[in-house]
Image (cartoon, rainbow, N blue to C red):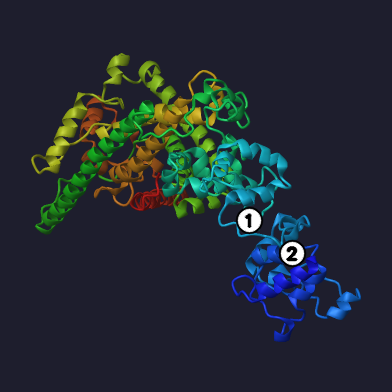
Amino acid sequence: MFKLFSRFAVAVLLLLPLSLPVQGAENGLAIDPMTCLECHDNVVSAEVFAASVHGRNACTSCHTDITDLDAHMMGEQMPGPAQCVRCHKQETAEHFASVHMLSGIGCADCHHDIHSHQYWQGDKNIANDKCTECHWDSWEVYNDSIHGQAVAEGKMDSAACFDCHNLHRIEEIGDPTSFHNREFHTTVCLDCHADQEMMARNNVTSVAVSTYMSSYHGKTYRLGYPELVAGCADCHTSHGVFNHNDPRASTHQDNLVATCGACHPGATPLFVQFYSHGDMTDRANYPILYWTFIAMTTLLVSVFAVFWIHTLLWMFRGFVENREKRAALIRGEVPHHIPEAHKIYRRFNRLHIFLHLLVIISFLGLSLTGLPLKFAGQPWAKLLMEFFGGAHNAALIHRWCAVITFVYFGASLVMSWNFLFVRKDLPGNPLQRLFGPDSLFPNLRDVRDITAMVRWFLFLGPKPVFERWTYWEKFDFLAVFWGMIAIGGSGLMLWFPEFFGGFLPGWAFNVATIVHSDEALLATGFIFTVHFFNTHGRPEKFPMDFVIFNGEMNKEEFIHERLDQWKRYEELGITEQFVKPKPSGVVYDFILKTFGFLAVFTGIGLVFLMIYAFMTSGFH
């Protein structure tokens, strides 16, 4: 009786094009579906199959190896696995490269209800249920999580299994320390959390992505080295993502020491006060970060505004001065003759030269390895990191250059102590030496020199002459001390966070990050624009002032630039003490000039890269 009903049902369904629009054997099919269902009604009923996603297909659409009914009935021609690829080419291709395929899991292992399979219509619960059949342990954790609960409630924007692992292209996660595994820990989270429209639709903050990307972890990830840093799932876990107020959450206050300690052994309750997603533009929630950001931005704008205006005025005034000198020569007005004008005098000794070489090497190394991190979203930043052999090597170079910086800073302190308290060839007590003409410490003369220089810029007075040190040279020297406090101090904190986290609150690292980043930007921008112009780019020195490399200056240059120093030396009768019998050697000059030009061109190149980064808004 049941078989008779089945034949009737199939006959009816064959007449309904929307239910089962198949054709009988007389229309070209190898075997009529009604014939199959007569024997295989224990596998599938006509009604269920017709209502399934495959209801429009005949049996032999999948079981293509059954072409002869008699042979099949005799057991000579039996069906093999269904050839899903005939219709599902993309899905099969994705599955072929999946970890399921490598593990011998075929289509029917997940789609075992192939004859009754229904359209899922975007219901993530159906997809999750499939994964649950094998991955029960993960499911138990996921089911209680924020994502699992939201999907169960019908919020289809929330993450289901396949949102992270895909439907058919299930990739092997691999070694927990591998590139792919580490990248996966962050990339899959960004797929949703970087979608601001989706986040707004579900009342979820989107600041997590931007703040992560502006952190050291996020920037290293963007540069292509996720295996070196923590990703989203390292802090929030993969499946058990809970609200941070939930005691089960890895980010709950009671669990933070263990969570952070996984990467930072020795993490303390003070250490975990770090703002993982602190937004320095959010004054209400992060006032300390906000005012640090405002202070550093004000410092940057102020310094650049003052000195770039100073540079532009000097550039124009120097250009006019050169034209005036040329016009005077054309008129036959010969400048005052200086006897032995090309006699060589020593301005810097070998220690000065050596220390300045250390400054150049360390500063360029710090800039070349630090700026890619600052502008991690830029293509050129990734190229620089690849040039250094990866972020790990760049970090090593950066730290070795930092050590060199501490070396020359320490030498400067020793030399300053020696200048003030030890040397016997200088007159006066330490206070008189500090404010004397041989000191690099500012004094009232610098105020007069600045005023006279500005008057010369504005064509209101003659060009001033200087003593041993100009006001811009003193600024450069004192900037090292400020830089060591700001860049050096913050850099040490970020280099040894576990040590400093033992007695400093974690948010101090947020402050250190802002200070280190912005102060480094100030230093590189200042050195590669203002300092380069003052030293090498001004009309009377272009293209390079070589004095810092050989310590030499001729008498004409000495008198022209530092007339008051020359007069003082003459009054003291010590000018001949600074005479240099012969100039530096050809090979030495060639090597050092080549090095100097490479340094200048490198700095200028970095300036253009920074400008490009700001113009394309890739500096966050």
Task: Answer with the quarter of the image where residue 17 lies.
Answer: bottom right
One can see residue 577 in this view: no
Vertically, is 340 above or below 64?
above
Residue type at tag 1: Leu
Question: Of discs 1 and 2, which sits in the foreground?
Answer: 2
In the picture, which quadrant includes the N terminus?
bottom right
Percent x, y for residue 369? 49, 44
Front residue of this view, candidates 526 and 155? 155
Q: Residues within 10 Å of mark 2 (few under 14, many from 20)?
A: some
In the picture, which quadrant includes the C terminus?
top left
Q: Earlier in the sequence, mark 1 or mark 2?
A: 2
Residue type at tag 2: Ser
Residue 246 falls left or right of residue 577: right
Percent x, y for residue 582? 39, 43
Q: What residue lies at 38% left-to-right and 41% top-to-bottom?
A: 524
Q: Secondary structure at mark 2?
A: loop
Front residue of this view, candidates 275 and 245? 245
Front residue of this view, candidates 288 and 91? 91
Percent x, y for residue 309? 21, 43
Task: Answer with the quarter of the image where residue 487 lies.
Answer: top left
Task: Answer with the quarter of the image where residue 78 lies.
Answer: bottom right
Measure the alpha-carbon separation of dots 1 and 2.
28 Å
Q: Residues within 10 Å of mark 1 (few under 14, many from 20)?
A: some
Residue behind mark 1:
167
Q: Which mark is residue 305?
A: none
Residue behind mark 2:
45
Q: Secondary structure at mark 1?
A: loop
Give the mark count: 2
Percent x, y for residue 296? 33, 33
Front residue of this view, candidates 249 and 282? 249
